[in-house]
Image (cartoon, rainbow, N blue to C red):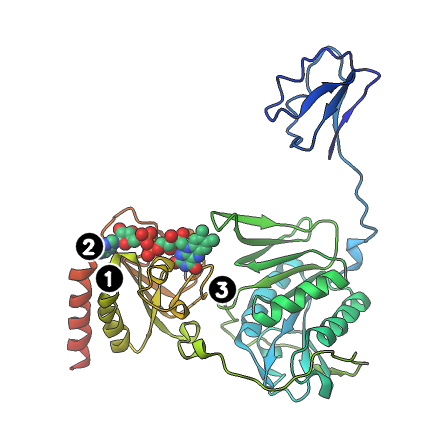
């Protein structure tokens, strides 16, 4: 859209200038002008004696016939030949979207020797395209992005999804540039506008203070990365009629040479894989009080999580942080102790199966997502919880 000024009709009456809430209009050298602060709100347009102002839709032609693009593609991540759990989560999401669009789900798998590619079919794929070559054994952003971009241009999927992992983030952004598509990174929710066949891509925006839903109406494919542990894999085995099709292609040279894998030190505290997480927030008040959180987590066979406030205070290491700038987790049981439930924390844990929150403020937002909320002082509640778990375990 654009604000058009018909200078032949404009009488320089100045009536529009005080009406503009952004001060975007001025008369300069005998001409009404608009500057870049104009938000196209339209306040200046109506009801002047002479209508010299008009907001007009600019014809946008991406040159793409969106109707030619069909189907949902999922990039399946593998490391050391093992398909990563985020691929199955993405397939669960893709299946739900595919039902609404009535299209097949295709998985793109790249590698040399990959274990159990058929598992992708039972996890929700109608077809697996397995591009196999010794040069694709380990992830390399150059060859991977070239191979996938070529396949996208040739086969025209309407949606392409990948994990918001280190690999997915670097790969999908490169592919998006190559195929001239947009990319919504780090989505926490996906849905479909069935009427317009648009992917509704929801992610935190403005520092996590709002959730924005982004659409890509003009271009194809619609591309998104999704945070691990946000989506759920299918509960039941998918009765796929498809198969794994091996594709060989010319793999471009990789300017990066693979030397060796060095394990990430912080992966020793893998809260993302824990079934039970006991999280402490600022309400824990002191680093030494984390021993109580650790004791409860140990008794439940779980891991210790933390809010960013607790991490920023230096009470516990960053590898424990849950939330937008920490890990996204989806355990069977999440216990939040002295955590207020800021949106940046909630986006990292709200897909947990069962949430128990202890907070002395009855209006704390964490209670909105909790299955069980205990309004009380955690220093009274947690020792009772520990005693009860010990009693039941007979220890
Ligand atoms: C860009 C950005 C990214 C962010 N990323 C993250 C992130 O990844 N993870 C994250 O957690 N935050 C993140 N934050 C910070 C987030 O906005 C909140 O500031 C933070 O989550 C608050 O942590 P908290 O709940 O521990 O502390 P507070 O908000 O201070 O809440 C403490 C809670 O403890 C309760 N309490 C106090 N004493 C007791 C007691 N004795 N018993 C019971 N309850 C008690 C209080 O009632 C209160 O609700 C981010 C912020 C921004 C801007």
Q: In the rendered image of this protein, does residue 87 appear above or below residue 244? A: above
- Across and down, in percent, residue 336 comes to 31, 61
Left or right: 353 in relation to 117: left
Mark 3 vs mark 2, CA separation in Å: 29 Å
Left or right: 71 in relation to 305: right
Q: Please report the residue visible at 62 percent of the width from the left and 17 percent of the height from the top.
A: 18
Residue carrying label 1: 286
The numbered mark, 2 or 1, whose residue comes first in the sequence reads 1
Mark 2 vs mark 1, CA separation in Å: 18 Å
Callout in the foreground (2, 1): 1
- Across and down, in percent, residue 344 comes to 43, 55
Q: Quadrant of the rendered structure where residue 129 is?
A: bottom right
Q: In the rendered image of this protein, does residue 150 appear above or below residue 349? A: below
Ligand 1 within 8 angstroms of badge 2 C-beta? yes
Q: Residues within 10 Å of mark 2 (few under 14, many from 20)?
A: some
- Across and down, in percent, residue 310 comes to 33, 60
The image's mark for residue 230 is 3
Q: Secondary structure at mark 2?
A: loop
- Across and down, in percent, residue 73 comes to 68, 68
């Amino acid at each position: 859209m654009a604000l058009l000024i018909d200078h032949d009709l404009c009488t320089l009456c100045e009536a529009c200038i005080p009406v503009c809430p952004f001060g975007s209009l001025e008369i300069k050298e005998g001409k009404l002008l608009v500057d870049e602060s104009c938000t196209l709100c339209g306040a200046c347009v109506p009801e002047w004696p002479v209508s010299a102002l008009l907001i007009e839709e600019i014809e946008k032609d991406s040159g793409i016939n969106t109707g030619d693009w069909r189907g949902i593609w999922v990039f399946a991540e593998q490391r050391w030949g093992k398909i990563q759990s985020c691929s199955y989560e993405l397939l669960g999401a893709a299946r739900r979207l595919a039902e609404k669009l009535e299209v097949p789900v295709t998985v793109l798998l790249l590698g040399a020797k990959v274990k159990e590619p058929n598992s992708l079919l039972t996890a929700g794929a109608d077809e697996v395209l397995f591009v196999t070559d010794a040069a694709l054994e380990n992830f390399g952003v150059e060859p991977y992005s070239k191979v996938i971009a070529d396949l996208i241009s040739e086969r025209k999927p309407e949606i392409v999804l990948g994990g918001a992992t280190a690999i997915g983030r670097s790969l999908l952004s490169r592919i998006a540039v190559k195929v001239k598509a947009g990319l919504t990174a780090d989505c926490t929710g996906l849905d479909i506008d069935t009427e317009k066949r648009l992917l509704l891509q929801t992610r935190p925006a403005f520092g996590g203070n709002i959730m924005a839903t982004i659409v890509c109406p003009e271009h194809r494919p619609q591309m998104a990365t999704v945070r691990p542990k946000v989506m759920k894999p299918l509960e039941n085995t998918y009765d796929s009629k498809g198969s794994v099709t091996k594709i060989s292609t010319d793999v471009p040279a990789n300017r990066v040479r693979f030397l060796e894998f060095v394990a990430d030190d912080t992966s020793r505290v893998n809260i993302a894989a824990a079934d039970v997480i006991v999280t402490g927030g600022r309400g824990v008040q002191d680093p030494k009080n984390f021993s109580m959180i650790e004791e409860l987590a140990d008794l439940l066979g779980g891991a210790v999580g933390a809010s960013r406030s607790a991490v920023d205070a230096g009470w516990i290491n960053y590898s424990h942080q849950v939330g937008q700038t920490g890990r996204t987790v989806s355990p069977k049981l999440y216990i939040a102790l002295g955590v207020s439930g800021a949106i940046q924390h909630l986006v990292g844990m709200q897909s947990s199966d069962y949430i128990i929150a202890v907070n002395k403020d009855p209006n704390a937002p964490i209670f909105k997502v909790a299955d069980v909320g205990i309004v009380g002082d955690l220093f009274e509640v947690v020792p009772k919880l520990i005693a009860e778990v010990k009693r039941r375990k007979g220890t």
